[in-house]
Structures are given as C-alpha cells and as structure tokens.
Image (cartoon, rainbow, N blue to C red):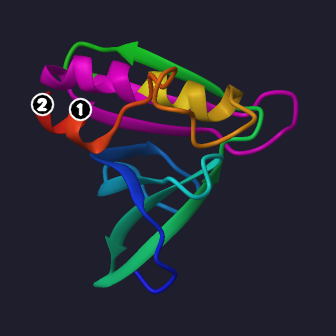
C-alpha cells in the first residue's frame, strides 16, 4: 500500500451486476478507513488485476436473501448512476448483514471515523469472529 491507507474490511464475493466487470466473477470488496464514502471491487480479468471504485455518496444499501446466496446491492440515491450487486454464500447471512450495516453507516455519517463509544461499524476483528 503506497499511500499508507488502512483497510477497514474486506469481503470475498462474486459479482452479480458490476459495471466494467463481467458477471459471476470472484473478487473482493475493500473498504478503506481514510475515505468512507468509497469502496473498491478488486478482481482479476485476463490475468490482470483490476479495481472498480464505487462511490457510496447518497446510495441506498440493500440486502436480499435468495435461495442459494445473500446479495448485497448498492443503488444510487437521487442521482443516476450505476447499480452494483454482489453475491455471498447463503451461509454468510450474518456477515452480509454486518457489511450492509457498515455501508449504511458510511453513507449516512458526515464525520469519519466515528468515536469508539458510538461506533457500531464492522471492524476487521468483528468480521473474523463470524
């Protein structure tokens, strides 16, 4: 990490609907602590690593339980923009709920990072327990 940014959490997932990435592609969602309104989807395509930056400003975060998967959606709010959907295994329902809760906090909190007394965001140690 050249810029010295700290990683808030990572989430292995499969792309369902991601602009600039094919469907059913294994990758990782990455949230950085320094810029809470942006997350990144990292994947390999054609042997090359690629990153898609996702802007969370004004976005609505959705969580859908399907028969074989848990889907996490990032839908633009008032402005038009791309819609992102990611799939997790059905067994990761609690993890998907925690990630959605953290993303909602990142969208709605004007100041980041939150103080530890009021923080309910998902941290790396919390994700390891799941």
Q: Secondary structure at mark 1?
A: helix
Q: Quadrant of the N terminus?
A: bottom left
Q: Quadrant of residue 91?
A: top left
Q: Is disc 2 in contact with disc 1, using a CB cutoff of under 8 Å?
A: yes
How packed is label 1: few (under 14 Cα within 10 Å), some, or many (20 or more)? few
Q: Which residue sits at x=24%, y=17%?
A: 94
Taking 50 as reference, is 104 left or right?
Answer: right
Numbered label attached to residue 126: 1
Numbered label attached to residue 21: none
Magenta span: 70-99
**Cα distance in 3D space between marks 2 and 1:** 5 Å
Q: Which residue sits at x=24%, y=18%?
A: 93
Taking 129 as reference, is 31 left or right?
Answer: right
Residue 40: x percent and y percent? 50, 58
Report if residue 53 lies within the magenta region. no
Residue 15: x percent and y percent? 38, 47
Considering only vertical position in the picture, is 84 above or below 62?
below
Q: What residue would you read off at disc 2?
A: 129
Q: Secondary structure at mark 2?
A: helix
Report if residue 79 lies within the magenta region. yes
Residue 39: x percent and y percent? 53, 52
Q: Quadrant of residue 42?
A: bottom left
Q: Quadrant of the C terminus?
A: top left
Q: Which residue sits at x=57%, y=34%?
A: 114
Residue 17: x percent and y percent? 49, 43
Considering only vertical position in the picture, is 26 above or below 124?
below
Considering only vertical position in the picture, is 108 above or below 38?
above
In-front residue for pair 82/114? 114
């Amino acid at each position: 990490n050249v810029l010295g940014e700290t990683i808030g959490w990572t989430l292995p997932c499969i792309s369902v609907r991601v602009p600039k990435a094919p469907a059913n592609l294994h990758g990782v969602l990455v949230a950085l602590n320094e810029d809470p309104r942006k997350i990144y989807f990292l994947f390999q395509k054609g042997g090359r690593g690629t990153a898609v930056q996702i802007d969370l400003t004004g976005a609505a975060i959705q969580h859908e339980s399907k028969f074989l998967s848990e889907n996490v959606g990032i839908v633009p709010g008032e402005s038009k923009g791309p819609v992102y959907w990611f799939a997790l295994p059905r067994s990761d329902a609690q993890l998907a709920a925690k990630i959605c809760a953290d993303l909602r906090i990142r969208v709605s909190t004007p100041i980041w990072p939150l103080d530890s007394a009021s923080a309910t965001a998902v941290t790396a140690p919390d994700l390891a327990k799941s």
